[in-house]
Image (cartoon, grey):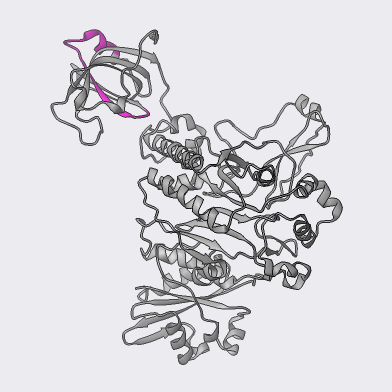
Amino acid sequence: MLDLLGNLKRTHYCGELRAADDGREVVVLGWVARRRDLGNLLFLDVRDRTGIVQAVFNKETQAAAHGKAERARGEFVVAVEGKCVKRQKANPELATGEVEILAAKLHILNTAKTPPFPIENEINAAEETRLRYRYLDLRRPKPHRNLALRHKIVLEIRKAMDEMGFLEVETPMLTRSTPEGARDYLVPSRVHHGQFYALPQSPQIFKQILMIAGLDRYFQIVKCFRDEDLRADRQPEFTQLDVEMSFPRQEDVFAVIEKVMVRACAVAGVKATPPFPHMLYKDAVRRYGSDKPDLRFGMELHDATACFPAEAREKLQIAGSVFAMAAPGAAGWSRKQLDELTERAKAAGARGAYFAKVAAEGITSTVEKLLGAENVKKLVEACGAKAGDLVVAVSAKEEIKGAEAAALVAGQLRLQLGDALGLIDRSQWKFCWITGFPLFEWSATDKAWVSAQHPFTGIVEEDLDLLEQPERRGEIRSKGYDIVLNGYELGSGSIRIHRQDVQERVFRALGLSEEQLRRRFGFFLDALTYGTPPHGGIALGIDRIAMLLAGEKSLREVIAFAKTTAAQDLMAESPSSVDEAQLDELGLAIKEGKKAAP
């Protein structure tokens, strides 16, 4: 027979009890985390979101409570009434380890089946199992800490934005489909048959319209949706800090976000020191092989193309550049290790990997016969390699129009080597701003120039005339910028286009016809004609910020109800089929055998 809660009221959370509470009558409510029966003495560890406290049931002094405790099992929901007392021997493993509860009464409020995995901090259960039983997984202390940290980060962000004069304004979840770089999630309209809403990939157009409306400073903690392939740091629905300002310089946006990040980091005990350094996109790619460089270690890249003469390039089938780096202390790597590194390079898109070992007695290289001793020496000198170092050079299998393909491949190897060699200082928090992005990037799929960010990104004024020169599209510089932390892009933004004539020129450069412009952006183009102020902003990934500050490697560890890399909610069994009646109401039919696009 289960007990009723009735008028019983908690006096303390389990994890709050301390030595100062000695002698107090207490009531705690929670789950049985552990049960230990020593005959006359029975111990129940009772857990809630704040932690665990030990309750002691004495058969000689409280026979009824002891008898009921004998029936309790793991994950039973209980209430314990008793006196908080100091333990004879403290348990340093618990925050409440100095005290325990001498139980006078036990109320069993609900029973529980044996869970599929232990409700403990560290478990070996497969992630699929954890997500399927998420309501159990979230009982563990680690998810509690992560969600509490996320709450505090978001709360601090809201406080900071409010103090800087920003207004939080909600924008629609049901809007129209616009091209913003990923597939839209579409929602069919029951009222307007054959027409669809789209879930927003971002509130981009709406936040620009808020600037046209004179709101001056807007922010929002907002859900966004993108139907794209997933990975550890990407979810189909994600949360971002969305910010927009009127009349800003780029530096104004940076100053706002740096204040926000300093305060968000402080919540997790991390010190961020502004101003954050700036780096041009082209320099980031050439020095680190990435537009989100990890600055916690050196091992910078060097253009080693000049060290590979024409004859060697022909034999090695090198069409573009060669980039190289010096891996400190790796000269002793075995042939097997170098073969594995070559395979990793090829998996990253390399044509080949070329090595030179630097020892006190001289230099040996896998490509010395092709390059010649003098060029190998130049390669080593170009990388600043010292005795004991391994020089790693790579070329790209396929060149990317308007990009340094070999540098991008080398950048992936740099991260792998930095990790393998223990060069990354995990105690460091290295922010930087990346600026000077190209406005367009080449799409190998579409065989055309497409927006590198979104089509509302501002353009460096000196490059405006290049919009009508297709052969020079790759040279056009944007007013875009990213904020990066420890090799992760935290957010992306730009100073926007605020003139209708410039916006239409960009759309034409993207190959959009007048009819397409009116159909997709008509209301926005009209809004631009009514006195649009210069404006700009940024969007930061809340999930990613929380993930990094919590010390996690996956977004799923800081999201209460996360989806798998197959975009499934295993607990709710979503997505799922729906009744035929619902489809009929919407005027929809399912095509049998229709496969999703890759």
Q: Position of residue 47 (x, y in %)?
A: 33, 26
With 217 as the anchor, is 96 left or right in this view?
Answer: left
Who's the residue at 34% across and 55% down the image? 427
User: 424 or 482, which is in the foreground?
Assistant: 482
Name the quarter where the N terminus is drawn: top left
Residue sticking out furthest to the right? 515
In which image quadrant can residue 32 be found?
top left
Count of residue discs:
0
Decide whether residue 56 is among the magenta residues.
yes
Decide whether residue 93 is among the magenta residues.
no
User: 314 or 467, which is in the foreground?
Assistant: 467
As displayed, is residue 208 above or below residue 61?
A: below
Q: Position of residue 178 (x, y in %)?
A: 74, 47
Q: Position of residue 194 (x, y in %)?
A: 83, 36
As displayed, is residue 412 above or below residue 24?
A: below
With 170 as the anchor, is 335 left or right in this view?
Answer: left
With 572 as the anchor, is 528 left or right in this view?
Answer: right
Q: Which residues are magenta?
A: 49-68
Q: Position of residue 320 (x, y in %)?
A: 61, 78
Q: Is residue 248 visible?
A: yes
User: 166 or 13, which is in the foreground?
Assistant: 166
In which image quadrant can residue 481 be found?
bottom right
Q: Is residue 221 visible?
A: no
As displayed, is residue 383 above or below residue 70?
A: below
As displayed, is residue 8 above or below residue 289?
A: above
